Amino acid sequence: MSVAASGAATPLAPPRHAARRVRAGVWLPLVFLAAGLGYPLLLLIANAFNVGDAQALPPTEFGIANFAELLNHLDWIGNTLLVSISATILAMAIGIVLAWILYRTTVPGQRVFEVLIAIPYPLGPLVGALAWSALGSPQEGLLNQLYASLTGVQEPLFNIYSVPGIIFVMAIFEAPVAVLMIGAAMQHMDSALEESSTVFGAGKLRTAFRVTLPLMLPAILSAALFLFTSMMGAFAIPTMLGTNARFYVATTAIYVMFQSYPPNYPLAAAIGVVLVVITALAVWASARVLKKRTHAIIFGRNYRPRRMNMRGWTLLLLAFECAYVLVSLVLPLGVLLLASLQKSGGLSWMVSNWTLSNFHYVLIDFPTTRQAIGNSLLLGVGTGTLGVAVATTIAWMVHRSQSPGRRLLEQATMLPQAFPRLIFAFGFMWMVMSLPIHLYGTLYSVLLAYIIVFLPLAYRGMSGVVVQIDRSLEEAARISGARWGRMMRTVTLPLLRAGLLANWVLLFMISVREVSASLFLSGPGTQVLGPAIFSFWDSGGLPRVSALAVVQAVIILIALVVVRRLARAKPGR
């Protein structure tokens, strides 16, 4: 029976040479991930049990003394869990509400708010910590000054250098990830499921809590797991906002031990192992919750997603969106721009106290920041290009090949998500130091680390695009005599164009603003923007560090504008 007669296309068996190429394409990324992820983890564990020479690599004496010592510092782990769990809950609450407003209601301005809500994530936690330290400092914070001038009350309105302040800033700058991940599922949910609830008399809010949220459980847990892992390894916000209050989390302790003389690598490694175990338990718990439960939201019949008319709630929901954009985007960028124009450390609205000399200093006078900007751009381009290439190859192999190793490859690709970035960078540093070739302190080591830690994000994006392409399009090319390479070049890659572009820019933006993954790997001459901004903050001088942060934000915003214009352009124009 012909394909046309049967109505179903049978996947064509690839030629023998193409099959060999496909099998190699499955196992080569596996080897890369095993070396780039497994070896650093092995070194991290080995150093955690090192009770001999702290500088020895590999260790020669083993014991559990480091974990015993860690019992005297359980507050580091407790503080980490406190801010990670609390910030994850707050970020998820914000993200769920925003995703529901954007994709399940008729509240106006969806296109505009989609862009505005997404921007805080690529701007990064470092910019958020710096901006909110200028906004919410008890003595000099702009909002506290404004409150004192309006009310005459000298007691500060709030103190950002506190545990609630840390949780708040972490949550608002990570919430866009929850919006993206949960919103993608909400857009594909059959609205008939919600309509059935209203038919039986349930109101809109009750329907949202009793129908929409339970069906979104896989997406919610996936987003929560991603956020929890990110916050377990968060460094910039807890360090910049918690130091004044002597509030230390695990990543702050690791950084202090790394910078001390002599460095206490074994105890730092023991802390890292504990964080990895905690995140692994979170992954296991998430899998257990979803096991043997059905959460199907797309069925075999055609449907058109319909939005709920919120009527009297519309203004309140619109106000919630505006409030989030205000605290996560408008106020942070506004205060950084104001601070970057100051002649001195204080914040003044008088134009006579403004100057552009801070931008002249970071862009022209100071060679370290010029190098950091150039290196960050190179890393952004390299991470975007190589990361998307690797992620696209893996996504195609997982969803198109018949290799028995494709599921193992998919699991290995998502594994870096379970490792806090600072902890991975710590182990990766030992790996590059132990290699026979010189990589430590070079951009190549930072590039390799970026590709590995951002691979789950790139794969998630490219996998969603690959599965949307019907196999029959590629099979038609094969029937016409096209070889595997020509089929990929002329059919598959052009169809993936929008996804390739979007994921390239995403990797570019988060590479430019990354701190944790490069903190231990960059060195003299290979400084990048994230650690450079952190070093500027550590040495004082709000105007100059704000100017550098504004430069970083401008780079990211330009990338965002360019990709939106390219995405709207028609192929071939």
Image (tube, rainbow, N blue to C red):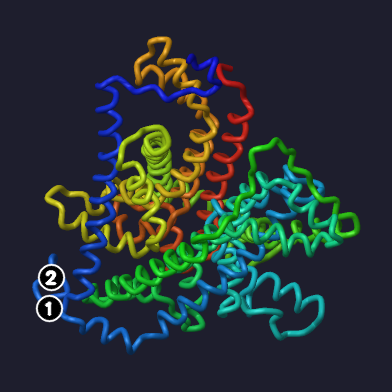
Residue 137 shown left or right of residue 317 in the figure: left
Residue type at tag 1:
Gly
Judged from this view, the residue extending furthest toward the right is 312
Task: Give residue 52's mark.
Answer: 1
Q: Nearer the viewer, residue 470 or 357?
A: 470
Q: Nearer the viewer, residue 564 or 224?
A: 224
Where is residue 472? Give x, y as percent. 49, 22
Residue 140 shown left or right of residue 419 in the figure: right
**In the picture, residue 539 is in which quadrant?**
bottom left
> From where the camera sits, is residue 353 visible?
no
Judged from this view, the residue extending furthest toward the left is 60
Where is residue 304? Give x, y as percent. 74, 38
What is the total number of numbered labels drawn onto the structure image? 2
Residue drawn where x is 79% and y is 57% of the image: 197
Residue type at tag 2:
Pro
Residue linked to disc 2: 59
Residue drawn where x is 65% and y is 61% of the image: 214
> From where the camera sits, is residue 422 visible?
yes
Determine whether 167 is above or below 213 in the image. Answer: below
Judged from this view, the residue extending furthest toward the front is 1
Residue 265 shown left or right of residue 248 in the figure: left
The quadrant of the picture occupied by the C terminus is: top right
Q: Nearer the viewer, residue 8 or 494?
A: 8
Residue drawn where x is 81% and y is 48% of the image: 106
| Disc 2 element | loop
Task: Give residue 247's mark.
Answer: none
Residue 44 shown left or right of residue 9 in the figure: left
